[in-house]
Amino acid sequence: MERCEVTRIHPQQVAAVQQQLPTDEALIQLADWFRLLADPARLRTLLALNGCELCVCDIAAVQGTTVSAASHQLRLLRAAGLVACRKAGKMVYYRAVDERVQQLLGHELDRLRKKG
């Protein structure tokens, strides 16, 4: 890795960057959000909900896991505001609510497909 040969801080640039950085609280929230997305089961769930509604049984079948495990992932995603649900009689259907997240995931998957 390339390094500077001398130590010299550029105060104006440092101050400008520091003013643009989010608060510590916002950084913690962002890190929590990325940590939530770092789990393959939750990513699979979000991708499965791209453009459609599924019940927890359907999501469990897609994931090849138990209803309890799928429900746990949905609870975390719902608490983060990434999925919402609606009740229809005895059924509860989940859907992705943040289109930007779906676009980000789709974009990155396309990039990976082209790369590999």
Image (tube, helix red, strand yellow):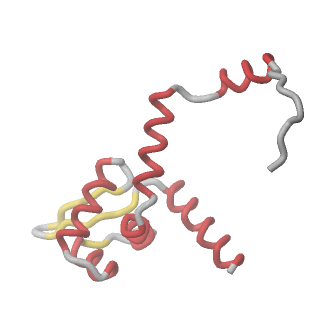
For the point 64% across and 73% down, the residue is 112
For the point 66% across and 26% down, the residue is 20
| Frontmost residue, 68 versus 48 | 68
For the point 52% across and 26% down, the residue is 23
In-image side of 56 versus 111 (left or right): left
Residue 105, percent from left and from top: 54, 64
Q: Is residue 55 above or below residue 72?
A: below
Residue 106, percent from left and from top: 57, 67
Quadrant in the rendering for residue 63: bottom left
Quadrant in the rendering for residue 68: bottom left
Residue 114, percent from left and from top: 70, 78
Residue 86, percent from left and from top: 23, 60
Q: Residue furthest front?
A: 5
Q: Is residue 30 above or below residue 73?
A: above
For the point 42% across and 45% down, the residue is 32
In-image side of 99 versus 93 (left or right): right
Q: Quadrant of the C terminus?
A: bottom right
| Frontmost residue, 15 versus 114 | 15
